[in-house]
Amino acid sequence: MADAPILGALTPDAPTADTLTPDAPTDTPASRTRAQFLSLHLLETLAAVLPVRDENGSPKTIVYGGVERHMITSQARRRAERVHARDRANAGIGALAGRSTGVRTREWALITARALAAEHGWDRDEAVITARAVLEATGLKFGDVAKATVANRTKVLLFAPSDAGDRIAAHIAAHEQEFRDWTAEYLTAQAAAAAAAKLRKGSRRQPASETGTDPGDASAADAKAAVPTLPPLPKGARPAVLTALAPRDAIDIALYGRFLAEIADSPNVDGAVQSAHAFTVQEAEQVDDFYAAADDAKLDRKKNALDFLDIADDAGAGMTGYQSLISGTFYRHAVLDRRQLRRNLRAAGMTEEQAEEASFAAEQEFVNSFVEAFPEAKKNSTASTGSLPALVLAFEGERPYNYAAAFQRPIDENPADKGGEGPAGPAGVERLLRHHTFVRDRRADIKSARMLTYDPQIDCLLGELRKSFDTGATTVKSIEGLTE
């Protein structure tokens, strides 16, 4: 591990993200038949849910087309999709079964310490101190040592392969005494540096007459400026840590990317997935739902009371409050850059053949997550995660295609005899498909369009629409069919 290169699986001949260009020969004959971008569009109708909230606990909204719309942020969607795919892979389900995935957390020191204790027999407290010192010396910044809740957590979230903590722990354990000696020296120097900094800070606050020093006395200034030097990590430790934290073959890092500014020589990854904020195709309407929670013990006591005073005592609910709920038909969009995905996998050290195989599996699982995953806020009280889309439209192209413009004019849900378009679900499907047909007729690169619906009413609507215009899309009956 000590002599491993910083990028882990990279070899001198493997291209990196910086050396690969759009014209680089990374495509196999099979991949050349597919366009660079896979565009996904989805309409789903939600009733009385609250998938995301702002800092005040209210639904998130945007103004579009001159009216307010409910919004589900792309951040919430992306995390739901990423975790959905990761959990399936770890459970041996789906196209990514058994493949490496990542974890985004501030707790890598604690994860490493758990591995040191569980796998290598270290004392828990010593393991935490050593793991934090090693990661800190590598370049990561931690919270205030005086605050137990943040002391051993990095200041930023770090997205790294899930086995990074095990790898770092294995390297520390393999050089156990060396790291024990280094940690003791590091902590001593760190404490001395903190004391020197505190002394300098205190001297700056006192006037020269109180400190008894002459502001021009260079020797006194030099003494105050002296800061103990922290010892460098043992030889080979830094490359080993960077190798463990590098993206390597974690598929979800290749898909969604990562950015780590604190360690300049740890590679960042440009994500291959672009996600748009979801918004309602009709004007937003919000309900502030009043709720009352019962106190079981109090109600049981009153129900079985033998005394009148017990029955009358403490009337009312145990707790009351309000929660905001939203309903509407949402338009969602995401796009997969197949070339960027293969580039990321090649930069992680995969061969061309391996990258092609992995990228196809990642595409299948990404499409599955786009359709199936849902943010879990309020899932128990609203059953929001059981929603199924009214329509999924997938097609290929040489550039991304976002169809948000189809809904710039909000859908008027009044009946047709009152000048409206009717319910937003069916009306949104017709709008989306007419918009797609119009664009497709003007863009020669759009091809391989497929549609999936879980709504029998929408299925009937699709049959009616085919009589009016050619959607150019094949109807499929499974998520897998969207990427065949």
Image (spheres, rainbow, N blue to C red):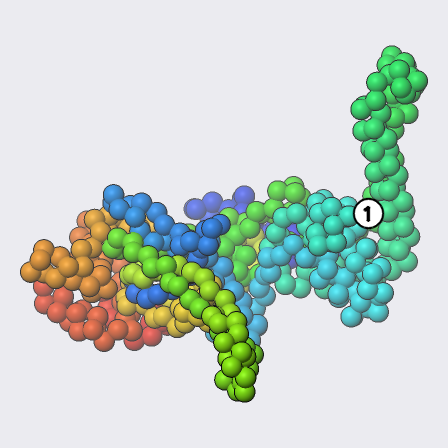
Which residue is at a point 46% across and 64% down the rendered structure image?
Answer: 320
- The answer to whether residue 113 is left or right of residue 154 is right
**Residue nearest the viewer, comparing 84 with 378:** 378
Q: Label 1 neighbourhood size at 10 Å, few (<14), some (14-19), many (20+)? A: some
Q: Quadrant of residue 231?
A: top right
**x and y, in percent, of residue 75 in the image:** 46, 54
State the quadrant of the C terminus. bottom left
Q: Say what amino acid the circle numbered 1 marks.
A: Leu
**Residue nearest the viewer, comparing 461 with 23:** 461
State the quadrant of the N terminus. bottom right
In the rendered view, would you say 445 is above or below 199? below
Q: Quadrant of residue 139?
A: top right
Query: Residue at label 1?
Result: 233
**Residue nearest the viewer, comparing 129 with 256:** 129
In the rendered view, would you say 391 is above or below 74? below
Which residue is at a point 51% across and 48% down the rendered structure image?
Answer: 270
**x and y, in percent, of residue 118 in the image:** 78, 70
Residue 154 appearing in the image: yes
Which residue is at a point 54% across and 44% down the rendered structure image?
Answer: 19
